[in-house]
Amino acid sequence: MTPDLMAAGAEKLAAWNARAKADPSATGLEPSFRQGVALYVEDITVSFDGFKALNNLSLTIDVGELRCIIGPNGAGKTTMMDCITGKTKPDSGTVFFGSNIDLLALKEQQVSQIGVGRKFQKPTVFEQLNVFENLELALKADRRVRASLFSRLSGEQLDRIGEVLTLIHLKDEAQRTAGLLSHGQKQWLEIGMLLMQDPKLLLLDEPVAGMTDEETERTAELFLSLEGQHSLVVVEHDMKFVDQLTEGRKKVTVLHEGSVLAEGLLSEVQANEKVVEVYLGR
Ligand SMILES: Nc1ncnc2c1ncn2[C@@H]1O[C@H](COP(=O)(O)OP(=O)(O)OP(=O)(O)O)[C@@H](O)[C@H]1O
Ligand SMILES: [Mg+2]
């Protein structure tokens, strides 16, 4: 290659990198799922003042998989989600979204823009707005449709809001002020808001905490209906809920002291002596 061509190439690369930094979706920074892997976490370690919250944690989530993560308080479950979403940078290790996106190189906002949605434990909906308006706002916060921020919703967008309202069991509450919803309904609304952005990977941290039994059961149905189209990572302490989600055939991962203690069917990990000792036997 001539020096001229090399200089031109370097310039292009620098411009691409600058754009990628400003707006990853504008540069075609699209995750590739051709290898069937949605999330690849390898050997991540996070220390807080010398204490290892995560200790060489490795985990792979397949495309369309629904994976439950269980483990005692302080095991590192939330810290793991913090690392995936760019909130916490691990001391070492690798986190890939699809086979090509190095999540550790991205900022929190960029991680959500390329298709990783996260649900925190506490519902954070806009209490003064109604259910429909909350979903509408979530749709318009999506950078890909930013041009339409002040425009009316297209038919397609209205359809999508309708679909999500049905999924989250809030069709009849569309005009209700979000602040008046039950705790469980607020959680569903927040999940609906995440869905409006069509994330490929959804991280859900204790989604049924504080829900009634009936709400918990409906939430499991909702997650099961999302499986396949999205990959889901669900952290929960409620074993009945985990049992419903895993349907007797899906793998669960048990975290303890920042590492994977066991992985297997729920029945297998429930029979695992180490798991009983540190977690389930309590
Ligand atoms: N910002 C922080 N500074 C110091 N220590 C932290 C910080 N965040 C988490 N930790 C510690 O790291 C460990 C793992 O915490 P983490 O919140 O990830 O656990 P968890 O598995 O989500 O627990 P729980 O089931 O109670 O939600 C805990 O000992 C916690 O006190
Ligand atoms: Mg936690």
Image (spheres, rainbow, N blue to C red):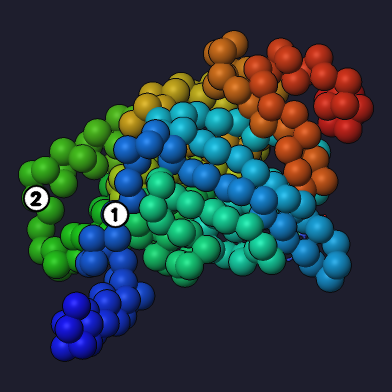
Residue at image location 87% in from the left, 26% down from the top: 274
Task: Please tell me whether mark 1 sits on a helix, a strand or a loop.
Answer: loop
Between 201 and 98, the residue placed more toward the observer is 98
Find residue 143 and report its image quarter: bottom left
Q: Is residue 224 left or right of residue 148?
A: right
The answer to whether 215 appears left or right of 18 in the picture is: right
Which residue is rendered at x = 60% and y = 44% of the image? 205
Query: What label sits on residue 154 in the rendered view?
Result: 2
Asked whether 56 or 156 is in front, the reply is 56
Judge whether 27 appears above or below 254 on screen.
Answer: below
The numbered dot on residue 30 is 1
Q: With respect to residue 24, does 115 lie above or below?
A: above
Tell me the element at label 2.
loop
Q: Position of residue 173 (x, y in %)?
A: 34, 37
Residue kind at label 1, given as amino acid type: Glu
**Total number of numbered discs in the rendering:** 2
**What residue is drawn where x is 82% and y is 46%?**
257
Residue type (three-letter) at the residue carrying disc 2: Ser
The reply to whether the C-beta atoms of the residues labelled 1 and 2 are less than 8 Å apart is no
- Comparing labels 1 and 2, the label whose residue is closer to the camera: 1
Label 1 CB less than 8 angstroms from ligand 1: no
Residue 237 makes an appearance in the image: no
Which quadrant is the C terminus positioned in? top right
Q: Residues within 10 Å of mark 2 (few under 14, many from 20)?
A: few
The answer to whether residue 65 of the structure is visible from this angle is yes
Q: Position of residue 213 (x, y in %)?
A: 61, 23
